[in-house]
Image (cartoon, rainbow, N blue to C red):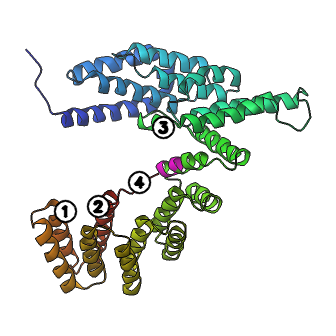
Amino acid sequence: MSEEWQPDAILKMKTNQLKREFFDYIEKNIEKIESNVPVFFGHVVASLDNSLPNLQDEPYDKFIDALAMKILETSKKIDDIPFTERLFDYAMRNKRGKKGKAFYDIILGMRMIHNGRCSDAIEQLKKYRSLDATICPAIAYCYFTLSNQQKQVGKDDSSGLPNEMMLAAREQMIELTRLNPPVNKLKEQEILEDARTTKIFWFMLKNAIEWFPDERQFFRIGIKKATLDGNLDVKEELLNIAVERFYDDMDFLREMYRLRFEQRNAGGLAGIVKQMTQQFPDDLEPIYYGLKLSIITARNETYSKFRKMALSKNMPPNIFLFLDFAFELMSGKQHEASACLDEIKQKFGSHHFYVMLLDYVMQDFLSEDEKKIKKAKKTMIDSLDNYCMRFLKIKTL
């Protein structure tokens, strides 16, 4: 008799519940698991087969990966390379497929670095440099460490020039810009990135910025990682340098605008819009940001100025329908906003998906609940921004 069919969402819910149960077991019995890893994985496989017989191969293998990472994260044997090798070997044996070995190899290579085995780590990691942005800096750090070791034992030529190992470290950082690997690919795959690995990444990136001050790609990679990690202090630090050093780079100006917007820094936003307009006087993008700032601050004079500029640069007419509506609504002019919305309905139809959203959000502006109004304003700005950014084909970093 075949097993009863279940929606994917139900299987995912049950999988996550079982995962939480095993995570709890690992935290409470880590020493027992360390002493007999094969028995633990045998128990895991039996539980999966009994509880989730219809689980597909990919989520099944990801389940095994997650438990292996949890053991590694919980274990006190953080620098025990043989234990890590055995753990990954047993995990791979119990997976249905063979995918994921690369990530195990990377974790093992990182552990080798932390254990002082830099030469072994270089060999372990070098074939995975295209997988994640942390790999090249990790290899560079190995060469950097070996260079310092040479100096300590007196093998350096003391000429003041970088030795062979230091040159290799710099070469690996240049390789990072050439390969431009994905940022946080390991995290996306739920693979552990410990604090030491992250520290190595930032240490080498900051060195690379000093070694190669004209290389913009280091800033792009660093800003993207800081954004994904939610590390706003580092993001702001990098952007401050990038905007000053590469004052005509729209990527950096755009990211600084977004940061200042998140910080609700109206003065900072105005400064960035001014710099954008000076550097790109013929582009619509800076003008759009000026319009957006005017809508947020509800300043009629500023909005009128940027609107005239947008008209002179032939901004698409449809954009003005939405911008005018948003400005009147954010300015508290409900009657005028209703008139703008009526014009939008005539143009797009009252059942257009975006028009229906605007109509719904506008009703919340009439609420007496301040929290509801605040939420409506955020929804309005976010949705309008997404619409305009797509319409104007404004890219992200």
Residue located 53% across and 53% down the image: 231
What residue does disc 1 label?
354
What residue does disc 3 label?
182
What residue does disc 2 label?
387
Q: Quick check: is 226 in the magenta stretch?
A: yes
What residue does disc 4 label?
395
Q: CA distance from mark 1 to mark 2?
A: 9 Å
Q: CA distance from mark 3 to mark 2?
A: 27 Å
Q: Secondary structure at mark 2?
A: helix
Q: CA distance from mark 4 to mark 2?
A: 13 Å
Q: Residue furthest left?
A: 1
Residue located 42% across and 69% down the image: 289
Q: Secondary structure at mark 1?
A: helix
**Mark 1 or mark 2, earlier in chain:** 1
**Mark 1 or mark 4, earlier in chain:** 1
Q: Amino acid at mark 2?
A: Tyr
Q: Position of residue 382 (x, y in %)?
A: 32, 64
**Mark 4 or mark 2, earlier in chain:** 2
Q: Quadrant of residue 154?
A: top right
